[in-house]
Image (cartoon, rainbow, N blue to C red):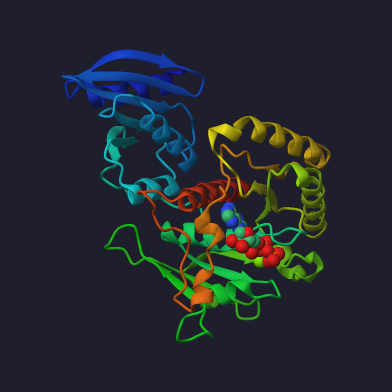
Amino acid sequence: MKTQSHNEWQNFCAFWLQQGYVVVEEWHDAKWANATLAQSGQHVWLRMRKSDEKVTAAQLDKFMYSLESQQDQQLIGCMASSKGFTKAAITQVTREAPERLVLLTEHKQKVVSAYPFTQFSESQAIAASAPAYVGVFTAKGGVGKTTIAAHLAGAFALMGQSVVLLDLDPDQNLRKLFAQENQPELAELHVPAVNKHEAGAMIRVLTPEQWRESQYPDVRIVIADCSPVLSENPIKLVKRMDVCLMPTSLNPLGISKHGDVIQRTFAHIRSINQKARLLAVINQFDASKAFQERNDVLLAYLQSALTDYLKQDELATLIHPDEAKIRYSHALLYWGFHIIEGSAPQLAFKLTGGRSYPRSDFLQLADVVEHTLASSKT
Ligand SMILES: Nc1ncnc2c1ncn2[C@@H]1O[C@H](COP(=O)(O)OP(=O)(O)OP(=O)(O)O)[C@@H](O)[C@H]1O
Ligand SMILES: [Mg+2]
């Protein structure tokens, strides 16, 4: 291990040793250092990220999943990272409030707990002066653009950031989805904060004509639900995009067509905007173990269909499902039923059995978007 991460590892181990634990087993690989520690029948699995980057919501989710599948139901999981945790990762655990999880980080060379003692003082990657622009595009209808635009806005709002959603689709689905019951001309949703004493955040749906940066100084992120007819999207806005997301899916009949659609959409945006990061994200993913092999095959197929384009555009990527994907869910399938019922606008983040797939998936996607925005600024 490099000296720096060796020292960090020693500090995190010392945190538990000082509480009377002893190391039972230690194992390392290139990215992670691990140990199990024990004290009178109680065990801790300490896992430290050896990296210069924060631990993401996806990495934390994987760790929590491994913890749940352990035989020892009393095992405490302790994820440690001297660089800390992304805002999405902290938001996710604070919402789910798992009892057997501890997150440790370092502050002024001292080990401190980021969870259960929530630490919200972390600076945000998007705390820049001008808002960041994210467009959700594809040259194909019905792939989940509106669903993704709305819930990505929801994930940023959960993290305390107010968002403007620009409705560029002539169908104006976003406007309908967020219209207030008694004031249909007003399309917005207030998302309560994770911490009760914080104010929460607003999602406002606007047309490009209504949107003025100077009128919404609290808005650091703008997400546009774009028209599937690519030429209908205002060129001025396409030029302004920092990140463009392309939803796609892994179904065998459509896979080569999806490759074509992504390349066509990427090439169209690139002809207008040379600096935007282009990210294809898999929607309607089935993460059950039974389909893992098929998904791997389909993913390899999609990757190879995109190889030619990706080789010549280094700012374009297919997000690997391990980093972020949107799973198929009934919550998303029936999202929007409130329009039929005439009830108040809402997101598909409701918990079932203490969990919400859409919520963790969109927090992970927000993580990838934030990371991409931060790295595009450097
Ligand atoms: N991950 C998912 N799981 C289940 N259903 C989904 C998921 N994503 C999207 N859907 C469903 O697919 C349908 C199409 O999604 P959506 O309207 O967001 O696509 P779109 O690309 O905006 O379509 P259009 O081009 O017509 O605007 C919706 O009924 C939505 O509920
Ligand atoms: Mg739509």
Q: Quadrant of the N terminus?
A: top left
Image quadrant of ligand 2? bottom right
Point out residue 241 in the picture as x, y percentages from the top left corner: 67, 60
Decide if residue 143 is on the left or right side of residue 24: right
- Choose between 301 and 241: the one closer to the eye: 301
State whether residue 128 appears in this view. Answer: no
Residue at (62, 50) in percent of width and height = 283
State whether residue 264 appears in this view. Answer: yes
Check the image and report above or below for 331 versus 176. above
Residue at (38, 26) in percent of width and height = 47
Point out residue 261 in the picture as x, y percentages from the top left corner: 79, 52
Check the image and report above or below for 200 versus 56. below
In which quarter of the view is residue 112 placed? Answer: top left
Residue at (75, 64) in percent of width and height = 228
Check the image and report above or below for 339 versus 318. below
Tell me how many marks there are: 0
Point out residue 368 in the picture as x, y percentages from the top left corner: 56, 46
**Among all residues in the image, which is located at the extreme top?**
25
In which quarter of the view is residue 22 placed? Answer: top left
- Choose between 13 and 376: the one closer to the eye: 13
- Choose between 366 and 18: the one closer to the eye: 366
- Choose between 357 and 212: the one closer to the eye: 357
Decide if residue 26 is on the left or right side of residue 335: left
Decide if residue 301 is on the left or right side of residue 21: right
Point out residue 170 in the picture as x, y percentages from the top left corner: 71, 75
In which quarter of the view is residue 293 placed? Answer: top right
